[in-house]
Image (cartoon, rainbow, N blue to C red):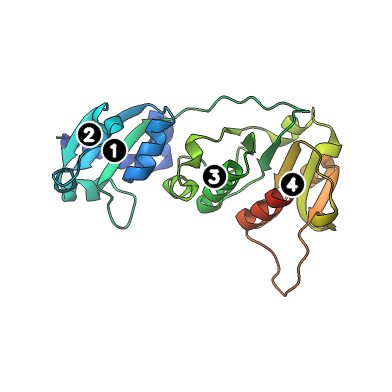
Amino acid sequence: MLSKAEVKIIASLKLKKFRQETGLFIVEGEKSVLEALGAGWECDRLIIRSDWYAKHDLPTLFLAQKLAEINLLEMEKMTQLSSPSPVLAVFKQRELPWSWHAGAANFVLALDQIKDPGNLGTIIRIADWFGLAGIVCSPDTVEIWNHKCLQASMGSVFRVPVCYRDLPAFLVKEDPSRVFATVLGGEDLRKTQFGDGGVVLVGSESFGLSAELRAQAGHLLTIPAFGAAESLNAAVATGIVCSWLRA
């Protein structure tokens, strides 16, 4: 069982302020919790709905955690979903080891001011699918602990290194010929020679890339349009670019 105070603390993690203060975040859903545990993330508390527990055998990874049973009403106070999952876990935040360096033979994504958490989560999933070395986010990009980001990543957030850095400073050491910026009005993506590694810059949904970042890129790339849409969703554009750099 959880005390009222514990329920209140966990419920507070819906807000970024309290996630920052505590260094904790919530993961909901049996599959997502198993993904996090399987990737070695430290679980502070695993919470199971009693009605679900009575009908299911718990996975071995669940049995090794600090476990609490609660009822549906209590779960509704803590959930961030419209329909409460039977499984909720509180994990400790951490930054996965970062091994990529300038000149390395793999690609990383650099995200500038991505504000939509669903887009960020989807981009993390894309990076995982294409085997990229990691993602560097500008300080004003949405946090990865936002539940919409976690849900959209489908577990990839527990495997893909994501860090928050000053992007111009991060790019300073990289050869501009290995920096590829996604923009409107650039060269045709399909004609680009990506080589064996580098940085792919993706700008915000509303404003695109800053002028400073564009100036640091050796390649300004555009996905050719054949219809009347003004632009592409940032995550969709990232997926298309990644498919070409792996072609």
C-alpha gap between disc 1 and disc 4: 42 Å
Q: State the image coordinates of residue 10 (x, y, percent, origin top left).
A: 29, 38
Which residue is the site of mark 1? 10
Q: Is residue 43 above or below residue 145?
A: above
Q: Which mark is residue 6?
A: 2
The amino acid type of the residue labelled 3 equals: Val
Q: For this view, does 79 lie left or right of residue 131?
A: left
Q: Quadrant of residue 97?
A: top right
C-alpha gap between disc 4 and disc 3: 25 Å
Asked whether the residues under the numbered discs 1 and 2 touch, taking CB atoms below 8 Å apart as contact, a structural biologist would say yes
Pick the front one: 145 or 103? 103
Dot placed on the residue nearer the N-terminal end, 4 or 3: 3
The amino acid type of the residue labelled 4 equals: Leu
Mark 1, other Cα within 10 Å: few <14 / some 14–19 / many ≥20: many
Task: Say which element carries label 4.
Answer: helix
In the picture, the quarter occupied by the N terminus is top left
Mark 4, other Cα within 10 Å: few <14 / some 14–19 / many ≥20: some
Q: Quadrant of residue 232?
A: bottom right
Q: Closer to us: mark 2 or mark 4?
A: 4
C-alpha gap between disc 3 and disc 2: 27 Å
**How many numbered callouts?**
4
C-alpha gap between disc 2 and disc 4: 47 Å
C-alpha gap between disc 1 and disc 2: 6 Å
Q: For this view, does 132 lie left or right of residue 157?
A: right
Q: Closer to us: mark 1 or mark 4?
A: 4
Which residue is the site of mark 3? 142
Q: For this view, does 21 lie left or right of residue 85?
A: right
Asked whether the residues under the numbered discs 1 and 3 touch, taking CB atoms below 8 Å apart as contact, a structural biologist would say no
Q: Which mark is residue 245?
A: 4
